[in-house]
Image (cartoon, grey):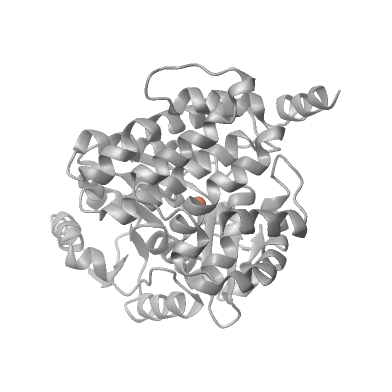
Amino acid sequence: MLIQMKKSIQENRIIEIKTPDSIFFGVGAAKKLPNQIKILSPGPVLIVTDPGLVKAGIVDKIKKCIATESLDVHVFDAVDPDPDKENCYSCLAMAKSIGANILVGLGGGSAIDVAKATAVLAVNQGQIEDYVGIDKIPTKGLPTILLPTTAGTGSEVSPIAVISDKKQHLKLGMVSPFLYGDVAIIDPELTLSCPASITAASGLDALTHAIEIVTNKFSSPVIDGIMYEAIRLAGQHLRTCVHEGSNLSARTGMAMAAFYAGMGLGPVNTAAVHALAYPLGGTFDISHGMANSILLPYVMEYNLSACREKYAKIADCLSQDNKTHSTSQASAAVDLIKTLSQDIGIPQRLRDINIPEEAIDTMSKTAATVTRLLHNNPREMTVKDINTIYRSAY
Ligand SMILES: [Fe+2]
């Protein structure tokens, strides 16, 4: 009876799939940037990025690419790894000072989220807090073109931006159709210089998206197919991306996995792994990808009884030897994730990243407030359950 009810929720639910107006995918796709800028706006252009990408020569490469057109281009290269409100306001001040008419977000989820938030702030004139939650942004911001340099967050195709409030140790999540970029350009070549540790954590973040979307209480068969393919691609390519970063074929496979998984964030979104990761980022500055990577197998263990059938399929997708799994072998999905995580050098426990054990009670209470995501989880989760999961991950 319960299973039948669940099926009818999933099969009868109408889902809306929004995307950026154009998505370019493929090796060399970055060359499309200058023409897309010209189509959207004559400039001035503000590239929003981080110092690591300046050092890696990617920003210069993009500037040269844009120089083929006579455009007025400026660079805000101060995006922090875990950007906070002040980081966005600095970017906004620069956008205003140059009279920016279009923003190019170049980087991982942090740079892309700052670009999306700044574009909205520039037009709507409010503060970040005014737009936290679902559908709180009144109108479209400046045009944005988003180029990911990691295969992870999927922010380039999602309606979500997450900004920190470091004083209050909070993550401020904004969800709005106005947070879709106008154009996403996914060029796997841009991920070639991504360091191994960031490749590992962001790759597992993408895998977390696909798993949380497919096992979601509000999952949809319309989306499930591409999520299983995202899981299969990540299982096939993530190890190679981490251990042989210059392998363009593997980088292309992971870029596709992250893109597919990102496409499910708008219509379905994530669940408890992301909710439990919030306090790790907000209080202890642990990166989004790392926090999710560590927590994923422990939350999966908790959810196992609620999604045996889907876990068996996930195990099929992750198996390196084309093995198929019955529902009685569903726990193999958790084991395969643990093995992958170990193979790519992810710390396995919260103690490995110096989280104090005595912080778990407070973290549990904070995570329990992220109801927007916990509501999606296939199995109900109380503060006590969250506490138990953190302790098992400790
Ligand atoms: Fe994520």
Task: Determine the image quadrant of residue 108.
Answer: bottom left
Q: Residue at x 45, y 44 (%)?
A: 206
Front-most of 152 and 365?
Answer: 365
Residue 58 spot, x, y in % from top left? 19, 59
Q: Is residue 99 left or right of residue 69?
A: right
Where residue 269 sits in the image (x, y, percent)?
60, 45
Q: Is residue 128 visible?
A: yes
Quarter of image, res 9: top right
Residue at point 45% right, 62% down?
352
Q: Is residue 213 left or right of residue 347?
A: right
In the rendered image, is residue 180 in sight? no
Q: Nearer the viewer, residue 326 or 162?
A: 326
Where is residue 14? Give x, y as percent: 70, 32
285 above or below 376? below
Name the residue located 46 percent from the left edge and 25 percent from the top edge: 317
Instruction: Say which residue appears at 38% left-offset and 19% top-offset.
Output: 321
| Direction right: furthest residue | 1
Image location of residue 88, percent across then percent down? 45, 74
Which corner quadrant holds the C terminus? bottom right
Of residues 117 and 153, the one drawn nearer to the viewer in this rendering: 153
Count of numbered labels shown in the rendering: 0
Image-based side of 201 in relation to 281, left or right: left
Looking at the picture, tell me which residue is in the foreground, 25 or 237: 237
Q: Quadrant of the N terminus?
A: top right
